[in-house]
Image (spheres, grey):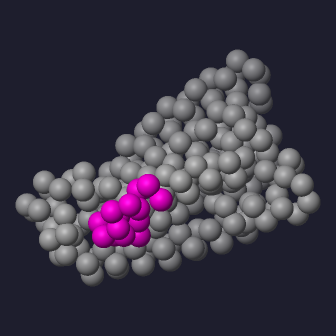
Amino acid sequence: MFVMTGLAVWNYFNKTVNNSVKLIQKNRSVVTKIYVPKFVFVLVDMFINTFKMFISFGIIFIMMILYRVPFEWTILYIIPLLLVLNVLIFGFNTILLHFGVFVGDLSNIMNIFMRFLFYLSGIFYSVATRVPGNYGKLLLKINPAALIINEARNVLLYGKVPRFKLLGAWLVLGLLLSCVGVWVIYKNENSYAKVI
């Protein structure tokens, strides 16, 4: 269940971020023929991957029943955790969608970066307890995937309350990135059809 929780969050984060770079190219026929706000492609991709993540969480809940892990009231905190994750992903993805149109190798760069981030996100280990010194705390502050994975485990498996200050900081950053991303898309979306 420890690994499954980490993988469920990571797979959602990884797939949506990597897909966002090529969303305009994948929807070329729509982009060149009719007007659609381009951030809608990000939302559609997020909804598809959210459904897959909920299937993974369903398996985790079944495993919790089989292994007799108690269902604490803190399990409800998974909702604000996923909300923060979705706001962050939307912000990242709108910006990556824009630059993915103009930078052809951005998908390769993102694959390498996401592979590096995979090892720093604590999917198979606990960042809070296994990383020596204060580096674990630092990693939780600067890596949103590690923070969400760690907090998801805390609320689902250990009955702990999440760190609201860190989550609030990432939520504010996600909202700022979302505003910037949507503004950049609206400002440049007429050039997307010409470039692709």
Q: Name the quarter where the C terminus is drawn.
A: bottom left
Q: Name the quarter where the N terminus is drawn.
A: top right
Frontmost residue, 76 versus 34? 34
Q: Which residue is rendered at x = 88% and y = 63% of the image?
A: 134
Drawn side of residue 148 relative to residue 192, left or right: right
Frontmost residue, 193 versus 149? 193
Is residue 90 found inside the magenta-colored segment of the image?
Answer: no
- Note whether residue 155 is visible: no
Q: Quadrant of residue 107?
A: bottom left
Residue 130 location, x and y as percent?
A: 86, 47
Q: Which residues are magenta?
A: 94-109
The number of discs equals 0
Q: Main secondary structure of the magenta part?
A: helix
Q: Which residue is rendered at x = 69% and y = 34% of the image?
A: 3
Frontmost residue, 183 versus 134? 134
Q: Which residue is rendered at x = 48% and y = 57% of the image?
A: 110
Q: Looking at the picture, does residue 81 appear above or below residue 190?
A: above
Drawn side of residue 102 relative to residue 53, left or right: left
Is residue 102 found inside the magenta-colored segment of the image?
Answer: yes
Residue farthest to the top? 66
Residue 129 location, x and y as percent?
A: 87, 49
Residue 90 location, x and y as percent?
A: 44, 62
Residue 133 location, x and y as percent?
A: 91, 60
- Note whether residue 172 is visible: yes
Residue farthest to the right? 133
Drawn side of residue 39 relative to residue 88, left or right: left
Q: Looking at the picture, does residue 5 appear above or below residue 61?
A: below
Q: Which residue is rendered at x = 39% and y = 51% of the image?
A: 19
Drawn side of residue 174 relative to residue 41, left or right: right
